[in-house]
Image: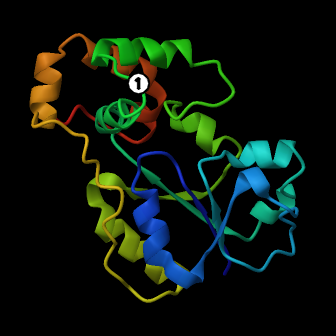
C-alpha cells in the first residue's frame, strides 16, 4: 500500500519524516520536476504545501489520491498557535496580540502557515491523523497500518526560542487572545473535538 504523508506546519512533521526514513521519498514542491501520476509507486511527502494546489497546478494527477493511504499530523489549536508564534518571532518581533491580528490579515492570502486545517486538507478524503498530544501512540498505529517497523520518533526542530513561560503562563499573560484563537480555528476545534488545554 503506497502512502502520502501531508506535512502540515508545526505538527511534528519533520520528526515523523525522519522516523519514516527510507520508506518515504521527500519531494520539494518548489522544484517538482515531474508530475505525480496515478501510476506513482513511491511513498511520498513534500514540504508544507496543500495537495489541492498541486492538482490545480497540474503537478499531481487527482487519481493518485485513490488507493493511497493518506495521513497527517494535527495539533491542538491553542498549542499550535503558541508554537507558530514563537517560530515566527525568529523572523519578526511582535506581541501575541499582534500575532492574532496577523491571523486575520493573512486569512484570505494564498499561503500562510497560520491557515486552519481546512486549507491544508481541502479535497482530501479518508485522511488518518497523528495527534500531537498522542504522538508516539498514533505514529505506532500508522506504522502498523503501512507495514513498516515500529520505531521511536526522532526529536527534531525543538524550538529553542521558547521563553521560560509555560503554556499556561503564556495564556495567563495574554488573556485577550484565547477567544480570538477559538473564533479563528473554530472549524478545526469542532472537527477534532479540541478544548483549551491550559
Q: Is residue 43 shown above or below 186?
A: below
* Residue 161 location, quadrant: top left
The residue located at (83%, 56%) in the rendering is 60
Residue 54: x and y in percent read: 79, 48
Viewer-proximal residue, 127 or 34? 34
Q: Is residue 4 left or right of residue 94?
A: right
Residue 111: x and y in percent read: 64, 31
Q: Quadrant of the N terminus?
A: bottom right
Residue 16: x and y in percent read: 44, 67
* Residue 149 location, quadrant: bottom left
Q: Residues within 10 Å of mark 1 (few under 14, many from 20)?
A: few
Viewer-proximal residue, 15 or 133? 15
The residue located at (56%, 83%) in the rendering is 22
Q: Is residue 197 left or right of residue 94?
A: left
Residue bearing the label numbered 1? 92
The residue located at (66%, 52%) in the rendering is 125
The residue located at (29%, 48%) in the rendering is 159
* Residue 76 location, quadrant: top left
Q: Quadrant of the C terminus?
A: top left
**Count of marks, rendered view:** 1
Q: Is residue 189 shown above or below 2?
A: above
Amino acid at each position: 500500500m503506497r502512502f502520502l504523508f501531508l506535512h502540515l506546519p508545526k505538527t511534528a512533521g519533520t520528526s515523523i519524516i525522519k522516523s519514516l526514513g527510507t520508506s518515504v521519498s521527500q519531494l520539494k514542491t518548489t522544484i517538482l520536476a515531474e508530475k505525480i501520476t496515478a501510476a506513482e509507486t513511491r511513498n511520498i511527502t513534500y514540504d508544507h504545501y496543500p495537495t489541492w494546489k498541486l492538482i490545480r497546478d497540474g503537478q499531481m494527477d487527482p487519481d493518485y489520491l485513490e488507493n493511497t493511504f493518506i495521513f497527517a499530523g494535527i495539533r491542538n489549536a491553542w498549542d499550535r498557535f503558541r508554537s507558530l508564534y514563537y517560530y515566527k518571532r525568529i523572523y519578526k518581533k511582535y506581541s501575541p496580540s499582534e500575532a492574532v491580528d496577523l491571523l486575520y490579515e493573512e486569512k484570505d492570502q494564498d499561503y500562510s502557515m497560520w491557515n486552519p486545517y481546512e486549507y491544508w486538507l481541502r479535497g482530501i478524503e479518508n485522511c488518518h491523523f497523528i495527534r500531537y498530544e498522542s504522538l508516539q501512540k498514533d505514529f505506532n498505529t500508522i506504522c502498523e497500518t503501512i507495514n513498516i517497523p515500529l520505531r521511536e520518533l526522532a526529536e527534531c526542530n525543538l524550538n529553542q526560542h521558547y521563553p521560560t513561560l509555560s503554556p499556561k503562563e503564556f495564556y495567563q499573560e495574554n488573556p485577550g487572545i484565547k477567544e480570538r484563537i477559538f473564533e479563528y480555528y473554530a472549524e478545526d476545534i469542532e472537527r477534532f473535538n479540541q478544548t483549551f488545554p491550559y
